[in-house]
Structure formats: structure tokens, C-alpha cells
């Protein structure tokens, strides 16, 4: 998991390739535009479903069931709450954090 607000010039190839972005909102879109859509597989969101920026939006449950090997980027102003939610679901112990630059 990577916690980000802004990632100018960050190299996704060095980081992890494709990721799941937690947060189908403004920060998630900003992340997608910054790193390029080829690096975002899907969005995870607690309230939204469907598509966002041409990518599917899934629930955390679906992520756990089908995509657990895909790294998560938390791109929302609620990153502290989301980080706790991920830890409560057993994801927090496999985490790395990108420094929150904002």
C-alpha cells in the first residue's frame, strides 16, 4: 500500500507497475493522470461502483477475493481511515508507504 497525495515525477515502473487505487475521486484521478492510466488496474471505493476514468470500481471485499496481489495506492483525503480499514482486513501488515508530500 502506498499513501499518496501528490507524486510529481514518481516512477511507477520502479515502484510496482500496476496498482489498485483506493479512492475513486479527485485524488484518485490526479494519481491516474500523474502516473498514466496504464499503471492503474482499477479503483477501490467504499461508496461508488461502476467505472471511473475508464477503470472499474470495485469494493474492498472484491479486491480481497480477486486482486490481493495487486498493490494498493491510497489516494484520498480519508487516507488515515482507509489505512485503518485495510489493516482491519489483514492488508496493513504487507504495506509500504510513499511519503505524503502535500
Image (tube, grey):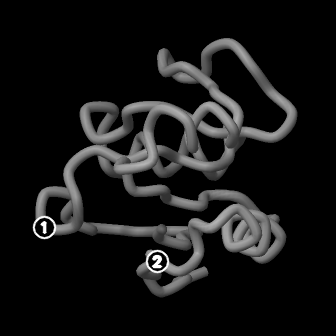
The percent coordinates of residue 3 (x first, y second) are 55, 73
Foreground tag (1 vs 2): 2
The percent coordinates of residue 1 (x first, y second) are 48, 68
Q: Residue visible at 53% across and 22% down?
A: 53
> Relative to residue 27, is residue 12 drawn left or right?
left
Instruction: Say above or below: 73 vs 18.
Output: below
Label 2, on which residue? 95
Instruction: Say above or below: 69 vs 43.
Output: below
Mark 2 closeness class: few <14, some 14–19, many ≥20 residues within 10 Å: some
> Relative to residue 29, is residue 46 drawn left or right?
right
Q: Quadrant of residue 85?
A: bottom right
> Relative to residue 40, is residue 66 drawn left or right?
right
Q: Quarter of the image containing the C terminus?
A: bottom right
Label 1, on which residue? 14
Q: Residue visible at 49% across and 59% down?
A: 73
Q: Residue visible at 64% across and 28% down?
A: 58
Choose between 84 and 76: the one closer to the eye.
Answer: 84
> Relative to residue 2, is residue 9 drawn left or right?
left
- Tell me how far mark 1 sits from mark 2, CA to CA: 16 Å
Instruction: Say above or below: 83 vs 19.
Output: below
SS at mark 2 in the image: loop
Q: Residue visible at 83% across and 70% down?
A: 81
The percent coordinates of residue 28 (x first, y second) are 59, 46
* Disc on the earlier residue, 1 or 2: 1
Amino acid at each position: 500500500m502506498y499513501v499518496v497525495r501528490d507524486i510529481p515525477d514518481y516512477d511507477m515502473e520502479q515502484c510496482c507497475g500496476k496498482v489498485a487505487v483506493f479512492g475513486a475521486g479527485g485524488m484518485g484521478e490526479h494519481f491516474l493522470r500523474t502516473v498514466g492510466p496504464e499503471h492503474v488496474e482499477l479503483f477501490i471505493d467504499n461508496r461508488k461502483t461502476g467505472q471511473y476514468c475508464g477503470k472499474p470500481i470495485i469494493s474492498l471485499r472484491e479486491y480481497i477475493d480477486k486482486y490481493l496481489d495487486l498493490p494498493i495506492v491510497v489516494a484520498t483525503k480519508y487516507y488515515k481511515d482507509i489505512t485503518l480499514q485495510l489493516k482491519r482486513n489483514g492488508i496493513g501488515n504487507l504495506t509500504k508507504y510513499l511519503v505524503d508530500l502535500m
